[in-house]
Amino acid sequence: MNHLEQLISEWLEFKGYFVRNNVKVGPLKHGGHEGELDVVAYDPKTNRILHIEPSMDSHTWTKRETRFKKKFAAGTKYIFPQVFPSLDKNTKIEQWAVIMGSDSAHKTLGGGTVYTVPRIYEMIANDLKHKAEKEGWPKAIPEQYMLLRTMQHTLRWTVPR
């Protein structure tokens, strides 16, 4: 798991999602699997499923489109039977392609919504700032969320309050 997958997983779990990482799906008869889902998360409060595929690649948009289309198709096919089999099959799955860069010309990729890494960092930082305002900074994020806790301390000590 790369740091981006880890950070996103910590953030979602901290927010109350049940998170699964690097789930191999679609076992093949000759061995191996049809695909791997990087981050799949379920929020029981909102009945929301997120399938997130973070990528640090620098491939062309054409190659990215092919890769993400395959990943999101595997998610659509296998999330209910393999990842969350007890959930209602009509639960909507939101798919996010998290990519490097700041290209705003591409809103979707492989059928998923594009979020840039800077946008994800901003979303996480805003959640942490909101929590700080609501509950106060002395409340440290639990230590099992190492990357999220690092962001919390960085925001506390480097960003004017």
Image (cartoon, helix red, strand yellow):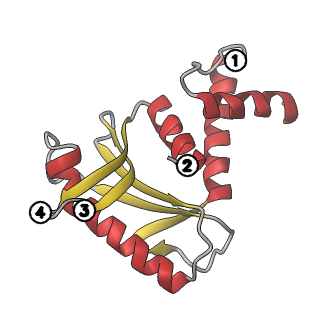
In primary-sequence order, the first of circles 4 and 1 is: 4
Q: In front: mark 1 or mark 2?
A: 2
Residue 79 visible? The answer is yes
Instruction: Count residues near mark 3 (Cα–Cα under 10 Å), then give few for <14, some for 14-19, many for 20+.
Output: some
Q: Please name the residue that numbered disc 4 is placed on.
A: 29
Q: In front: mark 2 or mark 4?
A: 4
Give me the residue at 56% from left, 78% from top: 106
| Foreground pick, 7 / 57 | 57
Q: Please name the residue that numbered disc 1 is placed on.
A: 136
Q: Whole-Å distance between the Cαs marked 4 and 3?
A: 21 Å
Quadrant of the snapshot with the C terminus: top right
Give me the residue at 52% from left, 74% from top: 107
In primary-sequence order, the first of circles 3 and 2 is: 2
The dot on residue 2 is: 2
Instruction: Count residues near mark 4 (Cα–Cα under 10 Å), then give few for <14, some for 14-19, many for 20+.
Output: few
In primary-sequence order, the first of circles 1 and 3 is: 3
In primary-sequence order, the first of circles 1 and 2 is: 2
Image coords of residue 42 (percent x, y): 32, 41
Find numbered disc 2 in the image and state the secondary structure of the residue it sits on: loop
Q: Are marks 1 and 3 in contact (CB under 8 Å)?
A: no
| Foreground pick, 21 / 10 | 21
Residue farthest toward the front in the current orientation of the protein: 30
